[in-house]
Amino acid sequence: MKIKFQTPTGMHDILPDEQGYFRKIYNVCENAANFYQFKKIDTPILEETELFSKGTGMGSDIVQKQMYSLKTKGGDFLTLRPEFTPGIVRAYIKYGMRNLPQPVKLYSIGPVFRYERPQEDRYRQFHQFNLEILGEANPVIDAQIIQIFYNILEELKFKKLIVEINSIGDGICRPRYRKILINYLKKRETDLCADCRQRLGKNPLRVLDCKEEKCWKIIKQAPQAINYLCNECREHFKEVLEFLDEIELPYNLNPYLVRGLDYYTKTVFEIFEEHGIAQEEKKRNALLAGGRYDNLVKKLGGLPTPACGGAIGIERIVNLIKTKEVKVSSLASTAQTKIFLAQLGDLAKRKSLNLLESFRKKKINIAESFSRDSLKSQLAQADKIGVKYTLILGQKEVLENTIIIRDMKTGQQETKKMKEIVGIMKKKVEKIKT
């Protein structure tokens, strides 16, 4: 039979078997955020379109090609968020967070939307974990953001990580570099791809982010932003690198790293697995990325406020974890279920509802299959999910206020009083853990 409805192109279901991966990544990310005293913020999935066109930048691919935008019945122009940062900055301004003790540390986790060609690790709806620190210009913030993300990847079993880092200057020194870069690229304009010829007139730095073969050869010979930094940007970058040296994070200076968003200033970074460097650089995909954006708050209507942040694409991390020797069970954030409750007859079924609630209150995981009536099928289900014990409750046990404990490995059974069963099973489960 032909299936009538499919997921929209580029979007995907996260099935139960995959939830363990997502749950583990969320837990690692949120535990790191909590340790470093970030506070969670949830912003709307829909924002005013101008927030992104003005914040992310008209010269970015996100605004030019990738936004899902709509006009409401009331005439408002809204966009499904393609990233978190502009929405978080909007909230920072709207709620007067500048009046809070600075810096303000915020994190978000959830879906974002970009219309792009579906391919491996790239979806039109995907999930991000985002960190932002607003209100502090010190280079130590750049290093700390990088360190937190690096530690998250290590905890997720990524090895031999390398930080690719660059400085793209600010409003003082970047105009000069921009002019020099344009002069260089203009002389080679006919050899650039169509997208880069268009970028040359709108945002020439974006040419450096191109992955096309014909452009890559030109990019490798292009002037480097790091050679045209003003004293302030040069000193800032120097201190960032000194902090990374101090905490012994491996990094590689990449003079052609610019990132694809217009709001970045000074530090930009991406993190890769080191074995990827052996591949052609233009074909590598970063595990995560970020940078400093000291002008964005002012650009969106606030007072001048320095800021720095970054984001992890969750689906990309999930797909890479699947290629490693990491079992789903070792990623599960909840304790494995060790107990199954089998019931026989309506009276036992009714009694089982209260019994399950007693286990829940004691935070003891217990599985059941209320839709099945035969003991054989329920024991088969218990065996399938690999529990250590099955509790058997029939009409006789209900009337006697007892319950049977069955050891699924040995088949041995013992009968205990119903009122004592939660305490008994709690001790048995704890003994398994030790």
Image: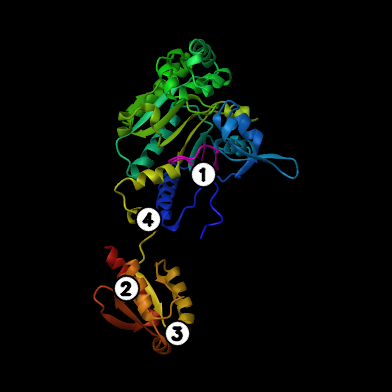
Q: Residue at x 62, y 36 (%)?
A: 90
Q: Position of residue 303 (x, y in %)?
A: 62, 28
Question: Foreground mark, 4 or 1?
Answer: 1
In this rendering, is residue 234 above or below 423?
above
First-in-chain label (3 vs 4) = 4
- Dot label at residue 110: none
Q: How far apart are the two marked residues, 3 and 4, measured between alpha carbons?
A: 34 Å
Q: Position of residue 51 (x, y in %)?
A: 63, 34
First-in-chain label (1 vs 3) = 1
Q: In the image, what residue type sits under mark 3?
A: Gly
Residue 123 highlighted magenta (yes or no)? yes
Question: Is disc 1 surrounded by few (<14), some (14 to 19) or many (20+) residues within 10 Å?
Answer: some
206 on left or right of 366: right
Q: Position of residue 30 (x, y in %)?
A: 45, 47
Question: Foreground mark, 1 or 3?
Answer: 1
Residue interval drawn in magenta: 104-124
Residue wearing tag 4:
332
Residue wearing tag 3:
345
Between 351 and 233, the one lying in front of the other is 351
First-in-chain label (2 vs 4) = 4
In this rendering, is residue 116 above or below 334?
above
Pointers 3 and 4 in contact (C-beta within 8 Å): no
Residue wearing tag 1:
10
Between 99 and 291, the one lying in front of the other is 291
319 on left or right of 187: left
